[in-house]
Image: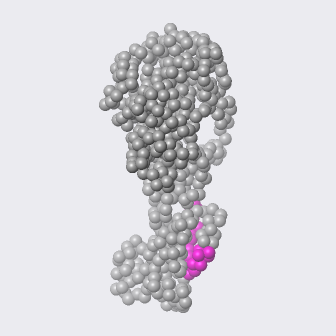
Amino acid sequence: MTIHQISIFIENKSGTLIKVLRQLKEAKIQIVASTIADTTDYGIYRIICSEPLRAVKMLQESGIQANISDVFALKLDNKPGCAADALEIIHNAGISISYLYSFLLDGRGILIFRTNQPDLTKETILLNNMDYMEEDALAKTINI
Amino acid sequence: MYLHKELETMSRDEINAYQLEKLKSTITHCMNSPFYKKRFNQEKLSADSIKSLDDLRRFPFTTKEDLRATYPFGMAAVPLEKCIRLHSSSGTTGNPTVILHTRNDIEAWADAMARCMYMVGMRPNDVFQNSSGYGMFTGGLGMQYGAERLGMLTVPAGAGNTKRQIKFMKDFGTTCLHAIPSYASRLYEVMKEEGIDPRRDLKLRVLAIGAEPHSDEQRHRIEDMLGVKAYNSFGMSEMCGPGVAFECPEQNGMHIWEDYYIVEIIDPVTLEPVPDGEIGEMVLTTLKREAMPMIRYRTRDLTRILPGECPCGRHHKRLARMQGRSDDMIILKGVNIFPIQIEQILMRYKELGSDYLITLNREDINDSMTIEVELNQLFTDDYGRLQSLTRDITRELKDEILVTPYVKLVSKGSLPRTEGKAKRVVDNRITH
């Protein structure tokens, strides 16, 4: 029900982000989605990519502070209102979202998010027959 | 157990009486030093000013700056032809300093060193190897004379050439070693590379470690690696060198030899004495030195006296491990802060690495402190948890140092690395 996300500690100074991207390029890792917010001292750069386990190991070995975590990935129809409907269900279950971002893949909207209650979130997704993406399926899609 | 039983086991009353007598003769002897003669005459002080040990506090301090100002021979209390040795420390700022020794000074130094060595179980049938540099660094010759005085077979290997050090240990059956703590670890690394198991292939059993600040954990690590007992050694060239204070077999504080020195612990700001058990700057007065006696020398080393009696039977006071230097002290918004206070808090967080940098800034009349600290690893993908880590550290530091620092997490390896002593404080304030 979840997919791997890499989180990278990015100090707010010139050249930090490009250093990370160069490493990923050299390792031939394909990024499908990424996000970073504007903060003062540092931020967390989050990416969804091909071969996340190899990518995080490579980053760590080159001295970059990165970790891997599992995030929810809902598959939505590419139509107005679908994100609202999905989040309505999550909200009604009493779940809070820590962060969220989205991207398009094969004509479907993918909603990535993390919540304060992962078990309840799983249950809610299952009970409401929501469509979700898993790591294996994502890996196949990227490799095509 | 005791090399100098009578002196080592003096009661507190006996030590006080001994010190009072020696202090008077030292002050009298100081009048032969142009520096002290002028200073004591100005202050109208003499040996007659000493009625009890407390009267020592009427005398002014001696500082490193005094040593520099009188370079090279302005402090000598004997004619140069009476001196047989000088040691000089290279000053990074201004003049270097010179310490002179008469034959009796060298003898007394050797006696003190031999006493330390005997205390931790070194005996005449031991083989003693010294990995300190010889020459101006007092850890070389100081240890050498002490080991010879005790009658051990000495191996003056000197610094470096690690493979040769290990070969000597193996071939000569070295049982006792003097090394700085970081070098003891280095020796073990090379032993492993050479396929040498110190427990199986060597006879090492006693290690004297000093000249470099280290923690008790580091000592235990060295003991485990090499299969030895390691004892902390304290010395400084201004007093002679090693042999000023040394741990006894209890391994709980270093006995400072009070037949050689009067020790005071003072508040570095008020210059008033602090009670036993509290940290302050160590001030030493020599009781036996002929060539360059020193009255109330401010060592700048921060330590405390461990209260209570030592089970080893020696009543000479015990010093805790050195806690840093009073010349590192930061004054911010009128508060005195030692970097070690900050370090001790930062080191409690397993999320943080061991490197940090304190920067002091001034905007208009507002002073502020920024502490950059390296994140050990990214333990979360949650920005909020990093923020709350920063908040916790800030709160704990505020409780300790009474000002609120700006704590900034930085990535590992981003703070400047320096060879040897790390730079911990950058003061950008214009303070003149």
Magenta includes B71?
A: no
Q: Is residue B285 above or below residue B347?
A: above
Q: Is residue B334 above or below residue A67?
A: above
Residue B426 can be seen in this image: yes
Identify which residue, B336 or A16, lies in the foreground.
A16
Residue B124 picture quarter: top left
Horizontal and vertical percent position of residue B203? 41, 43
Horizontal and vertical percent position of residue B430? 67, 41
Residue B273 can be seen in this image: no
Horizontally, is B308 left or right of B429 in the view?
Answer: left
Q: Residue at x 61, y 28 (%)?
A: B87
Q: Is residue B47 above or below residue B198?
A: above
The residue positioned farthest toward the top in the image shown: B48
The residue positioned farthest toward the left in the image shown: B311
Identify which residue, B430 or B213, lies in the foreground.
B213
Horizontal and vertical percent position of residue B385? 45, 63
Residue B38 picture quarter: top right
Q: Residue at x 53, y 35 (%)?
A: B156
Bounds of the magenta segment = A24-43
Identify which residue, B216 or B336, lies in the foreground.
B216
Q: Which image quarter is the C terminus of chain A in?
A: bottom right
Horizontal and vertical percent position of residue A12? 60, 63
Q: Which image quarter is the N terminus of chain A in?
A: bottom left
Q: Residue at x 49, y 59 (%)?
A: B376
Horizontally, is B336 left or right of B6 in the view?
Answer: right
Q: Residue at x 61, y 25 (%)?
A: B86
